[in-house]
Image (cartoon, coloured by chain):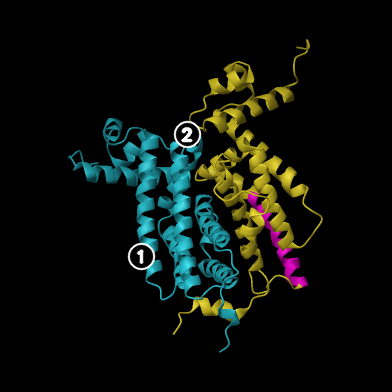
Chain colours: A yellow, B cyan
Amino acid sequence: MAAAGPSANDRRNQIIDAAMTAFAAKNYNAASMADIAGEAGITKRAIYRYFPSKRDLFYAVRNKVYKSIVEELWIKMPPSDNIIELAESLMRSHIEFSVKHPEMSRIVINTISEAASREFQANIEALLQDRADEIEGLIRSGIEEGYVDPNLDPRFVAWMIVMLFFVLIYLHAGKEDPLIPQDEDAVAVVMHPFLESLAPRRAEAVTRISSPRR
Amino acid sequence: MSTQRMPAEQRKRSLLKAAERCVARKGYYSATTADIAAEAGVTEPVLYQHFRDKEDLIECMRATTQKEINVYVTRRAFKQPSPLRGLRELAAAVLDYTIRHRNKMRSQIYAIPNLGSGGLREILNENIKTAHRAILFFLQEARRLGEIGNGVDISAFAWSFQSMIRLVYVANAMDIDAILKNRDKYMDIIDRLLATVSTSRDEED
């Protein structure tokens, strides 16, 4: 419109948004560069000026999704440093996020599926590592304050929690047909037993289950 | 690279195996039918005699594995002396199967990108609902035998339990060894989870 045209950065973002729509509507394979160009209202050639390949474009989309998740969910975390409360509210906001942004949650699912390729792998691990580090720190302070069991391995539990976020997005990715009952408190009900189980352990109850009864 | 003719069933199985290896190595999108055919030592047209397209092949791979894992897991779970032990065994069996068949188990997750295309989504939903019913069955038995308290919302707990099992699928697809290489720690969390509903903590010796 303006004689100068959109800046390179605007154009880049415009392409990324169009690609997100296309990748979410079809999937990585089925969405062609022509589809994306059509969605963005520009030529295929123009896209290749910004992204050398479809794969590069997909990386850019994925990075944008992860950045949005970090910004919307992690930076706006409630001002609590109780890991039990935090994990619960984070899980709830992950579900809200996947309901609010169905296209982004589809991209997240696509990312899981593409994890086998080595380039993705290195990339994702770095993204997740940061989350795991943060949670690990919170678990450690939970142990110090006495509401998380010191027998637990904080690193391991941190990874369990990070993986649970993905499971929640996975179980909720089809908004039309929610698998878990999706009322407000579903997360609290569903996740509560796990979080409760992190409390200092009642050792006997645990061994009674894990060792066969006589 | 034998050019010998194989019986159709055997050929199909060798193509499924080849698909497992290619997909695990390259990812769902990058593994082409040409790669898979080459891996199986046949030409692409041979592949297309057995499968309609790549999606069909991957779905067949997923369904075969699903059947296998269901049989393996339920067999182990039903051998246990009590329902709660059975539930514990269910989680252990999924983890053990995953550790042993990492490539195969990836195919369970790789089918998901086709979420948009109705059919698979329905299959996956059905899969998750079936697992829910199985977990619920053990919980109901446990309640009947007084292993878990009456105050427990067993349907909610079943979802919670299933999330812990699905987590193994995701960790495997994303190669998170922190989870897969720590069986004891994983089982400790499962035990703790079961302890939150178990009545045995109230028992006096």
Of the image marks 1 and 2, the number of the one nearer the N terminus: 1
Q: Relative to residue B7, is residue A42 drawn left or right?
A: right
Observer able to see residue A134: no
* Residue position marked by numbered label 2 in the rendering: B117
Q: Main secondary structure of the magenta part?
A: helix
* Rendered location of residue B143, percent (x, y): 50, 71
Mark number for residue B48?
A: none
Residue found at the very far bottom of the displayed protein: B205
Q: Relative to residue A94, is residue B75 drawn left or right?
A: left
Asked if residue A26 is positioned above or below residue A34 in the image, the reply reads: below
Query: Disc 2 is attached to a residue of which chain?
Result: B
Secondary structure under tag 1 reads: helix
Question: In the depicted view, which residue is nearer to us: B26 or B57?
Answer: B57
* Residue position marked by numbered label 1 in the rendering: B75
* Rendered location of residue B168, percent (x, y): 51, 57
| Residue shown at 55% from the left, 70% from the top | B194
Question: In the depicted view, which residue is nearer to us: A105 or B24?
Answer: A105
Q: Quadrant of the C terminus of chain A?
A: bottom left
Query: Disc 1 is attached to a residue of which chain?
Result: B
* Rendered location of residue B49, percent (x, y): 26, 33
User: Is A137 covered by the magenta stretch?
Assistant: yes
Q: Relative to residue A61, is residue B127 drawn left or right?
A: left
Asked if residue A115 is positioned above or below residue B56 in the image, the reply reads: below
The image quarter in which residue A39 lies: top right
Q: Is disc 1 in contact with disc 2, using a CB cutoff of under 8 Å? A: no
Asked if residue B38 is positioned above or below residue A149 in the image, the reply reads: above
- Looking at the picture, which amino acid does disc 1 mark? Arg
The image quarter in which residue A101 lies: top right
Which range of residues does the magenta coloring cover?
A: A128-145
Crowding at dot 1, Cα within 10 Å, few <14 / some 14-19 / many 20+, comes out as some
- Looking at the picture, which amino acid does disc 2 mark? Ser
User: Is A191 covered by the magenta stretch?
Assistant: no
